[in-house]
Image: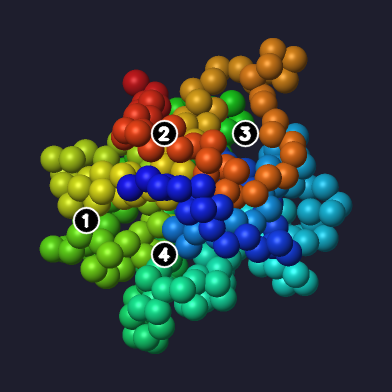
């Protein structure tokens, strides 16, 4: 599934809408995938968290929690990835996707999607932070055995949640699948999904990894995360930290990643264990 034309890549341009993000963050990547699935183009601003740019006064003024992503649409500021995704789908998706393509209109069906998104925010993301933050910020080189066990416990829960279904949220991928795959693909870098133990989850992950918005919105940042946790040293002078400082439209980001859509993305999968 690739972007077939420049018109498709550009999508609908929202001139007064900006997102501040860091590509290695699964929360940010879920928003990028939602933008691409909705074919929306907004201004995207990269924030270097290694240099504490998310703690700058103008960023704190928008989000006192000092987290990313941050969406500003006219005067509205939204600071949680799940809230951003549902906002974008509700405000800009419904007029074009009458059946509630990514977020159903029906209250019951929508509650199902939001339930899964709460599972991501309440269960998966905390496990991601516990496992990844010591590696990203505290020079730890391993995922501890208890963290491996906790993550695999979630894999098992998701295996059961899928049951006989192909997708988590319905008969096609929805916002729930997008937000879950952003986190699961990141956890998979640290604790690979065992296809023999979790065949349904593994199949779902493989199907999601072939979606065009996964390739344009998730693959680059996922590789950046993988490279980041595999580095033994951080050196700005050595050129290992690269900034993309200029804001750009989502359509520009999508056009830069079209080459990745020619085949499956192969990530470096490594398990960091203390033995």
Q: Residues within 10 Å of mark 2 (few under 14, many from 20)?
A: some
Tally of numbered tags: 4
Nearer the observer: mark 1 or 4; the answer is 4
Nearer the observer: mark 2 or 3; the answer is 2
- Residue underneath mark 4: 175
Q: Quadrant of residue 167?
A: bottom left
Q: Residue furthest top?
A: 238
Q: Quadrant of residue 268?
A: top left
- Residue underneath mark 1: 159
Nearer the observer: mark 4 or 2; the answer is 2
Q: Residues within 10 Å of mark 1 (few under 14, many from 20)?
A: some
Q: Nearer the viewer, residue 233 or 181?
A: 181
**Can residue 121 be seen in the rendering of this structure?**
no
Image check: 62 left or right of 272? right
Q: Which percent across, then down, holds residue 27?
A: 53, 52
- Residue underneath mark 2: 260
Nearer the observer: mark 3 or 4; the answer is 4
Q: Residue furthest bottom?
A: 107
For the residue labelled by badge 3, is the local secondary structure a helix, a strand or a loop?
helix
């Amino acid at each position: 599934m690739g972007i077939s034309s420049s018109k498709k890549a550009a999508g609908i341009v929202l001139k007064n809408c900006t997102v501040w993000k860091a590509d290695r963050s699964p929360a940010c990547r879920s928003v990028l995938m939602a933008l691409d699935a909705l074919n929306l183009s907004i201004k995207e601003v990269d924030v270097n968290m290694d240099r504490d740019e998310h703690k700058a006064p103008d960023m704190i003024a928008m989000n006192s929690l000092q987290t990313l992503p941050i969406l500003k649409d006219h005067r509205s500021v939204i600071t949680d990835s799940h809230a951003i995704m549902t906002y974008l789908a509700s405000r800009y998706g419904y007029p074009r996707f009458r059946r509630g393509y990514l977020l159903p209109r029906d209250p019951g069906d929508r509650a199902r999607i939001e339930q899964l998104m709460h599972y991501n925010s309440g269960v998966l993301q905390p496990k991601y932070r516990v496992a990844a933050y010591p590696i990203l910020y505290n020079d730890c080189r391993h995922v501890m055995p208890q963290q491996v066990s906790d993550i695999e416990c979630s894999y098992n829960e998701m295996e059961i949640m899928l049951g006989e279904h192909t997708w988590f949220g319905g008969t096609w991928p929805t916002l729930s699948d997008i937000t879950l795959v952003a986190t699961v693909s990141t956890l998979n870098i640290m604790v690979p999904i065992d296809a023999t133990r979790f065949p349904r989850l593994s199949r779902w992950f493989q199907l999601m990894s072939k979606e065009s918005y996964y390739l344009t919105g998730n693959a680059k940042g996922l590789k950046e995360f993988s490279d980041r946790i595999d580095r033994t040293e951080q050196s700005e002078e050595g050129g290992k930290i690269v900034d993309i400082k200029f804001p750009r439209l989502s359509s520009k980001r999508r056009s830069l990643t079209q080459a990745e859509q020619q085949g499956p993305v192969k990530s470096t999968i490594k398990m960091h264990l203390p033995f």
